[in-house]
Amino acid sequence: MNATVEVRNLRTHFFTRAGVVKAVDDVSFSVSGGQVLGLVGESGSGKTVTGFSIIGLVDPPGRIAGGSIWYQGQDLAKLSEREMRSLRGNRIAMIFQDPMMTLNPVLRIDTQMIETVLAHARVSREEARRRSRDALGMVGIPSPDERLRAYPHQFSGGMRQRVAIAIALLHNPDLLIADEPTTALDVTIQAQILAEVQKLAVEHGTALIWITHDLSVIAGLADQIAVMYAGRIVEFGDATTVLDRPLHPYTHGLIGSVPSRNKRGERLRQIPGMTPNLLSLPAGCAFRMRCAHADVACEAEPPVEPRDGRDLRCCHPMDQAA
Amino acid sequence: MIAWSIRRLVQACFVVLAMTVIVFVGVHVIGNPVDILISPEADQAERARIISNLGLDQPLWRQYGYFLYDALHGDLGRSFVFNEPALKLIAQRMPATLELAVTAVLFAMFLGVPLGLYAGLKPDGFLGRAIMAGSILGFSLPSFWVGLMLIMVFAVQLGWLPSTGRGQTETLFGVPWSFLTVDGLRHMLMPAVNLALFNISLVLRLTRAGVRETLPMDFVKFARAKGLSPARVIFVHVLKNIMIPVVTVLGLELGSTIAFIAFAVVTESVFAWPGMGKLIIDSINVLDRPVIVAYLMMIVLLFVAINLVVDILYMLLDPRVRLERKS
Amino acid sequence: MSATIAREETPFRRFVSEFAASRLALLGLVVFVVIALLAIFASLIAPQNPYDLAQLDIMDGRLPPGSKSMVGYTYILGTDDQGRDMFSGMLYGLRISLAVGVGSALFAAVVGTSLGLLAAWLGGRADSAIMRLVDLQLSFPSILVALMILAMLGKGVMNVLLALVIVEWAYYARNVRATAMVERQREYIEAAECLALPRWRIMFRHLLPNCLPPLIVIATQQVARAIALEATLSFLGLGVPITEPSLGLLIANGYQYMLSGKYWISFYPGIALLVTIMSINLVGDQLRDVLNPRLQR
Amino acid sequence: MAMFGARVIWGTKMRPSFRMLSFVICLTLGRAHGQTLGIASSAPVTSIDPHYHTFAPNDSFGAHVYERLVTRNAAGDMIPALAVSWKVRDDRTWEFTLRDVKFHDGTPFTAEDVAYTLNRVPRVKNSPASFSIYTKAVTGTEIVDPHTILLHTAGPYPLLPNDLGNIFIIPHTLGPDPATEDFNSGKNAIGTGPYRFVSYNPGDRIEMERSDDYWGPKPYWKHVSYRIISNDASRTAALLAGDVGIIEFVPPTDLPALRKDSRVTLSEVVSNRSIYLWLDHAHDGPSPLVTGPNGEVLARNPLKDLRVRQALSLAINRQAIVDRVMENAAIPTGQYLRPGSYSYVPDLPPTPYQPDRAKALLAEAGFPKGLRVTINGPNDRYVNDAKIIQAVAQMWQRIGVRTTVEAMPWNTYVARAGKLEFSIFLLGWGVGSGEGLNPLRAQLATWNPARGLGTANRGRYSNPAVDALIDQAMGTMDDGAREKIIQKAMKLAMDDVPVIELHLQKNIWATRKGLEYEPRVDEATLAMGVRESK
Amino acid sequence: MTEPPIIELRGVSKRFGPTYDAAARLTRSIASRMGSPPRNETVRAVDTVSMTIQRGEVVGLVGESGCGKSTIGRMVAGIMPPSEGQILFKGRDIARLSGRDGKDAKLKVQMIFQDPYASLNPRLRVADIVGEAPLTHGLVSRANFDTWLDAQLHRAGLDPSFKRRYPHQFSGGQRQRIGIARALAVQPEFLVCDEAVAALDVSIQAQILNLFMDLRRDLDLTYLFISHDLGVVEHLSDRVLIMYLGRIVEEAPTEEVFSHANHPYTRALLAEVPRIDARKHRFTAITGEIPSPLNPPAGCHFHPRCPHAMPRCAVDAPAFREIAPDHHSACHLNEVPA
């Protein structure tokens, strides 16, 4: 299957006064149409910046310092702002974490939808409105005609996220990047959104990059999983494989610390230490300070190697250690 | 909304009441208007006649009582100096001040917002920094000094604009306005700029701060992620959000400009602009109490009215407030 | 944000380093400090005591910069109409202007902050009483209030100070209350309540310090505003005594000479006022940026 | 008599108003050629009603529209106006022969109008400063024929023509008790003067149009725009910018530059307005703001000691004040009147500057170590008022009198002065009547408000000998004999140093190049006096 | 007679709403007279809730946002008073306790907050944050303060050498430990943990949860553990309470809830919680939104979304009754005669 988007050795760095922050450092992966890639990591691991890099919204002092992002034969990292803009919101769309903040509070829903249609399609306003209404209906918003004239604050959080999804899907994008879109939502609402998104991805053949810190959500949703740690993908492979037989000690620890994986009332398995500061990363494997298997070998940066059906960045994979 | 208005109104009544008491006592403490107005050659009988004529022979509380009684019957008294109803005097001067203040605020809006927008978008550029530095000048320069400099340069040296005064007026709704004639506009230009200087700086800074706060917001990023042009993102998504504080502040500034902030008095004095600021200063100088009281009452009401307008504007601009209030 | 930073980083140190990031603001601070020092040590620096009438001679009046005085020293910036050495006059005037500006801002801050905190903390009737007072104050044009107060009390530095405090306190009160209303909802205040700490302690040790950042910004603005207001009051004939002119009064006096070519009488004090207010504003601007939590840095 | 008795000027700084060059000029940026004159006044005209408020700007404006029976020329001499002539019938009766002219509305001017006006003056409602002080001497009127009227007084009253020189005549056709508002609206603004009233915009301007029926010389300007620009610098700027043709009360600070400026012409004349310091004669015990050299309270008021008063006067370098503070817009003086006036005292020169003698006198009076005093003064009323007291303070420091200066706005100042809270304080007095009885009666006569004597005696000076001479002068109808008595009284009083006279102001106008103004002693700025220079 | 429950809530309600001044009351009364009854602006965040917690128990309180669980936590911790009902600490109504007793009772119940950033005063050093209350209340003397403090920090898993630092110098997990140390410093017997791990990264969350369990064992603490995360609650709690729109809808021992959930809402919740063990599956969702607490549906609050709703559900609020030993539920379905 041809990949919709293929990221190769992407490096996005932030050149701050305090030093260079390598938010994304040598990241490679690809997603195909209809597939869901779960990009998992804790805060500061670079998963959101990866998303922004693909859609071309990395703001100064950050910029893409290396690597390429291939979409339909062109390298997105090399496109002009104008060319990128014609793809953004059109072929590649993105939705954000906080549904309360993604919609402009002082503009009506129809304004915010119609402008999106008109930005990429030469159609009349009536046609744009019709498409907007259809999109709202598609994501399960009742009486869309009426709701079009409302303001964002008249919607609940879940509804707003649906509107954001509707906006993202207006042009049937090839790739949808979802940055923790359900984290701020309640469980029952999250389930609704997940159900909608899953349906849409399948029906439209859209490639989906689902950025999250919640392994449980990903487990039910993703075809593939990429686990990020300190700006790098440490393990990337088929969802079932990675979750059932994690090879990287970090992935292993992460899965182990989920409460339901532990016996009730007993101490959880935990990863010691803290997530590192990207400004002062130690040389070599970024995880070695927290890793039980670390030794001198880890002081050199481990390369990405295929192993057991996945891409792994580790000197001491769990199967070996065990 | 209605509750708010009632509250405002009741509050305004208290303010007016407190204010009138303060003015009565204050004027009494400062001095006796008769001392200032009367001819020093007048004899005792003449003096006594005038004092009793103006009602100043009564104890202060009784004077206040009479005032309250008359005020409730719509009579705010006559100016000691002009022998005209105080309200009429104020009404005569109001258009001049009103149009000057409005022009100044318009200047502030149409210069301040674009400059602030630019400075906010390019905070580190040379021009952006220059605009900010310039805005500090607007805060710092004493306005009487700037006023005279304007006159020196544009009237005396270059001869482009008339130096002082109000110029030709045209009557609209029975009120003379100078913005309706070319000559009037020419007269208005310098005082309006002088008056606007502070407000331009203020609006500019507000706008810049607003832009800088709004730009990193998610909805701006989302708008960009939709593939909108930068122009649309800035002029629709960003600008509409920051207009809320800007309009609020502009409205309040309009109020205090009309209501005679420092600059209005000075500007009116330097440019011989026949507005309310000069009237009130002159009235304080001669302790023309009816005018002072009436003026302040007007100001309080004006503030209430402007607050109301600002609130309505606020509602128009911010749907969150609008819908909350409506329901 | 990591605990592995070896150096102990206090909020103050962090604030200093962020503040110093703007060279312009640093320049403003340096200029302001220099100005403040000049003002504080005016009596040591100035060749003349411009407030001592015995040291003035109207026969030396309105001399251009660089003129020699009758008793020998040089008026480097000229003299005003009373024969007052402009340089000395400016140093002393600076002292008064700064004292009035900083003093009024400080007193107003204390009064306004206390009332604002009280309003936020007590709520209910006390809150509405205080806030109505604030509204009352704010719906009066500040210069008018100052004018009336000065007309009643008479001139004098202390009276100007008092008038400015009365004019300004409401700004602080309103802002402190607004900030405090937000801050008191924060969990650290709930935690303090949960720990059964005394109310006054929560108010002053927990709530107040966290309301300070916006206050500092307002205070810098109010210092500049107070200086300008004092200048305007002097221009209008109230304000400080004529024999002890502030910068504003010097400008107002010299303003009469603008058309006659004796520029130095108002030009130099004007420049001094400008530089002072600009430096305060530069500092204030940077403070606003550094202390504003909503700005991503 | 006092045509411009010390009237209260209202507003900031006692500088009269002037007229800005008219709006037509502003519009076209053209030059007016006998068409429109802009006059810039320094203080607002408070009413168009000529009898509402004894206030110099009102009279200055009023002289364009209304006329008096008797008026003054530029030099301050009395000349006929609506009265062709007048004579004393007996000690208590004056006969005025009236001119045959018409009011602006076409009704002829008759004796009835004079009687009507004199009757109306004390009845103006709400007047804060009534003109009745100038009409109260008239106890009855008697119309002999349409152009002759007799005025009766209670006793001999030599100053009647001077007093009537303040009263503008209005037509009796206005009916009983015409309202002030109707003057302001223009309805009642009808006189016989050279200009017709067109419009009044309070605080801004008054427009006037030449009256072609005027009996006297035809005014040069067809249209006059009489404008208010109270800010000194703005007034000068308006002239320099060409917006007005003439400005009054040119600020002294601008004089050196304007004297050299080829765009303007200055006209100046010494006025009858003197600036002086009142000394406290009211307190026999301690004076409020005078203490011993170390701040100790003195048992007796040292200002009651002639030597102290002389010392303070001798310590003042009047020429320095005139040169440095007043920019020569004044001359030093030792009395109220300008040289050449009726009843000017020739042997009363300005006090010389003798600091050593001043010190000696102080020591002689028992104050070898000097005194501590405070000088008070207004800061918004007289030309350079606050600067003058500072300069005096400097000079007193040099004879060991430690002087502090306190200046304040007129409104508070006048109230405190009235309560005798000051010891030494600055005031000015303009002798509008141009003769010495006016200051003697108002200032130097013993304070007796019931009789209207010493009403402006703010220091409460009292000298029975002076009082007696004043009474004598008041009863003397013969001008020559009266002048002698006045001079004697004035000399007697001023040698006693009741006040410390400083200087007489000059009245200064500035006109655009090509125009000239005949400077007037009485401070009035009249369009009739502005001509193109030859 | 055994000892009384450490915490007992009796019919506790909490209302939030604007207070109306004269002007507002006037307009509201005018509006209602003119036929447009004023909108209800009062939220009944907690609606007649009763519960008991025995010493040593860990009780999980589960619900979605706005259901009132945090409000209960705050009332128990003494931060806000209930509008109605009583809260008893060891059998004594805390509203009636005053002076020393009141303070002691208050100190015995402490709270751990959700937001590790907002819950620490940014202007105080760690030593002050942890030590202020014990010093103020005389629980520790100045002389022993340093060693005492080191022990406190150590117990919460913090390096005592950090005590001179400010909160911003710590990571989220460490801040949460500071918050725990602060609470433990006054020797509480009862901890209210309000979403105490929700804001933490997964790897850190496990550390903090472990700390809670260690402390419970070492200090004999009782917990009210408030969370929306069923996985966490399941792992930690002995007993679980489920809340929906201000009311408790189900209560049972943990095992029982997760194996035999009774209330339809509980069942829906359990069905929709994403599970790491559930691979790539179709999500199905309960329909509808959570209603606004301003306008809760009449009868059973859950009926508009309930798949089993009956007509009477829209009218009567179901009683909270025991359906099995120690298992309570508020659902009309349970009343259908067997």
Image: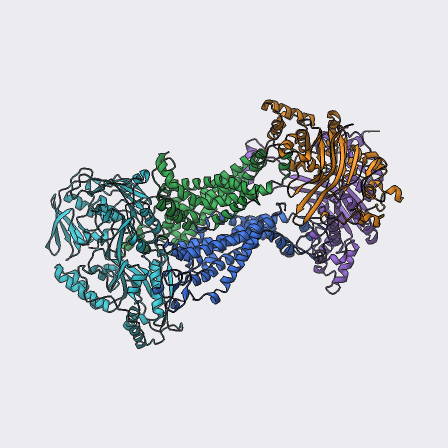
Chain colours: A orange, B green, C blue, D cyan, E purple
How many numbered discs, if any?
Answer: 0
Q: Position of residue A150 (x, y in %)?
A: 61, 30
- From the viewer's perspective, is A178 left or right of D249? right
Is D61 in front, or is B192?
B192
| Quarter location, residue D372 | bottom left
- From the viewer's perspective, is E252 left or right of D49? right
Q: Is residue C169 at least partly visible in the picture? A: no
- From the viewer's perspective, is D372 left or right of D194? right
Q: Position of residue C203 (x, y in %)?
A: 63, 54
Is E80 in front, or is D503?
D503
Is B110 in front, or is B291?
B110
Where does the C terminus of chain A fall, quadrant-wise?
Answer: top right
- From the viewer's perspective, is C82 left or right of A92? left
| Quarter location, residue C199 | bottom right
Where does the N terminus of chain A fall, quadrant-wise?
Answer: top right
Q: Is residue E60 at least partly visible in the picture? A: yes
| Quarter location, residue C7 | bottom right
Q: Position of residue D205 (x, y in %)?
A: 31, 43
Residue at image coords 53%, 50% = C171
Q: Position of residue A105 (x, y in %)?
A: 60, 36
